[in-house]
Amino acid sequence: MTDIFEQTVLCKDCHKKMEQTIVQKNGFELRALVCPQCSQKIIHPADVNNFEHYNNLKGKTYNVKLRVIGNGHAISIPKEIVDFIQQQEKMMNDMVKLCFEDMHRLRLDFGGEDDDN
């Protein structure tokens, strides 16, 4: 099946050929077409769907149990979060970063960036 973004798309306002570009939004790279004349943008529908899914997951709060395993502790990460991360990053069994930010806050970083905030 071919993607609609592989076809020539004309701007509905000025009828010029739209060019492919990447739009950054909250850390997401969204594929888009932009008109070089009037700057009209069309964002790829699949990318819009993934971005909306991310926003739905981002707003949720999960109650998970802290378990003792050997000399360490473990928490379970809800399946829908892990599935979404795997879908976007195509990674699992990679190392994640754990940061003790504040007295009641831990941060897990699944990304490959080496930014130490």
Image (tube, rainbow, N blue to C red):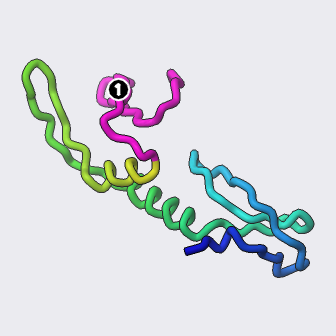
> Which amino acid, by three-letter code, is at mark 1?
Leu
Q: Which residue is mark 1?
A: 98
Question: In which quarter of the view is residue 36 placed?
Answer: bottom right
Quarter of the rendering occupied by the N terminus: bottom right
Is 16 one of the magenta-colored residues?
Answer: no
Magenta stretch, residue numbers: 89-117
Residue displayed at 58% across by 70% down? 45
Picture coordinates of residue 32 (x, y %)? Answer: 69, 62
SS of the residue at dot 1?
A: strand
Of 5 and 116, the residue lying toward us: 5
- Residue in view at x 41 percent, y 33 percent: 109
Q: Which residue is farthest front?
A: 1
Question: Which residue is at a point 45% across and 56% down the rendered structure image?
Answer: 54
Is residue 69 shown left or right of residue 49? left
**Camera-nearest residue between 62 and 45:** 45
Q: Which residue ends up furthest to the top in the rendered image?
A: 71
Asked if residue 96 lies in the magenta stretch, the reply is yes
Which of the 4 image quadrants contains residue 4? bottom right
Q: Name the residue rendered at 38%, 27% in the picture.
A: 97
x and y, in percent, of residue 99 in the image: 37, 24
Q: Could you say which is closer to the camera, residue 40 or residue 15?
A: 15
